[in-house]
Amino acid sequence: MSDMSTQTFAGVSAKSDVIDLMRSHGITPTQQRVEIAQALFARPQHLSAEQVLALVNRERHVVSKATIYNTLGLFAAKGLVREIIIDPAKVFYDPTTRPHHHFYNVDSGELMDIDASSVALSSVPELPAGTVAEGVDVVIRIRNCRSPAE
Amino acid sequence: MSDMSTQTFAGVSAKSDVIDLMRSHGITPTQQRVEIAQALFARPQHLSAEQVLALVNRERHVVSKATIYNTLGLFAAKGLVREIIIDPAKVFYDPTTRPHHHFYNVDSGELMDIDASSVALSSVPELPAGTVAEGVDVVIRIRNCRSPAE
DNA sequence: GTCAGTGCAAACCCTTTGCAGAAAG
DNA sequence: CTTTCTGCAAAGGGTTTGCACTGAC
């Protein structure tokens, strides 16, 4: 299990795997960072900083809050994880960096992946002068049927 | 200038216009709310709560911070404006409720409208059971050329 | 007169920061 | 040994809340 230098997911959870992943992204694999990476990459999911903190320290105190934020910010900057900004109250971190989109259930706050291949954008408008596209995020906001909305 | 009961923008800024708009959305048009609505609907734009506060109180103190937040939340809940959650630090309020999308310049934080017609989604995946779509947000993240990124 | 709306300030909560101690190479 | 990382606690900043006052009808 290896060769996932830039794209993620195939089941990255062994310690050596996340260490390889971090090294390939230019991140020094310290003990705390490995713990955090293992929690994130255990499976495709969307975790807030608070949730990562709880996961990592489930059994015993391993990582402090400051380190959680520092590390998640570092992972995002280095492209190891993706920041999902959908909930005004907190940022979610997504270990799946392969292009994909999201369903967002506004009732429950639940976030689900949508494979990029099933949301083809047929036309993209010209970009403002002097800029280059960095990525496209598509969020389909959904609601439970018969929701007490409006 | 009238007949904009549910969709916005054609140049809504006269006091009577915003009052009609609010009434048609079931919002009692108080003095402060009218001031806030006039600031928002003066033109298509994306304003944070802080910016609305500054705009409304530019000449003299008219509205308090609490009322800004209460009113913007009310407007969003009633569908008068749209909340744009792109910047983890703050929410933007968009007076244009007609379907449309956004360019987001990650360098400058600038937000620009994209007409919905120029971003056709060719296929939308099936929704999770028991849910209905409420809307689709497309955000094209852009960056200045030769940006010192990564 | 009654109910809804507003203002002020304090509370909240997620996130960031400063700095001393610990770990990586 | 030097540099980078971590932890603690305190600060920061946008947003929310509690409660008394004011305004809408």
Image (cartoon, coloured by chain):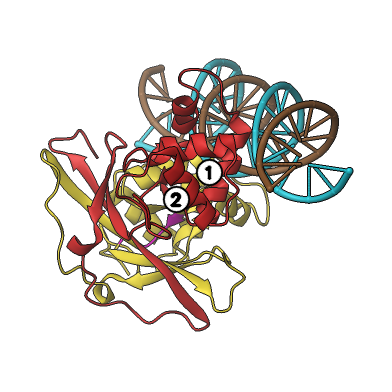
Chain colours: A yellow, B red, C cyan, D brown
Q: Nearer the viewer, residue A70 or B77?
A: B77
Residue lying at 47% horizontally and 46% vertically, measured from the top left: A33
Confirm whether the magenta stretch covers residue A95. Answer: yes
Total number of numbered discs in the rendering: 2
A37 vs B104: above or below: below
- Quarter placement of the C terminus of chain B: top left
Q: Is residue B101 visible?
A: yes
Q: CA distance from mark 1 to mark 2?
A: 8 Å
Q: Nearer the viewer, residue B60 or A149?
A: B60
The amino acid type found where label 2 is placed reads: Val
Image-based side of A90 in relation to A77, left or right: right
The amino acid type found where label 1 is placed reads: Leu
- CB-based contact (under 8 Å), mark 1 and mark 2: yes
Q: Is the residue at mark 1 from the same chain as the one at mark 2?
A: yes
Residue B88 in the image, given as x and y percentages of width and height: 45, 43
Residue B68 in the image, given as x and y percentages of width and height: 56, 36
Q: Nearer the viewer, residue A65 or B64?
A: B64
The segment highlighted magenta reads A93-97
Residue lying at 48% horizontally and 57% vertically, measured from the top left: B79
The chain ID associated with circle 2 is B
Q: Is residue A70 visible?
A: no
Residue lying at 50% horizontally and 41% vertically, measured from the top left: A69
- Where does label 1 land, which residue? B72
Residue A147 in the image, given as x and y percentages of width and height: 59, 73
Numbered label attached to residue A38: none
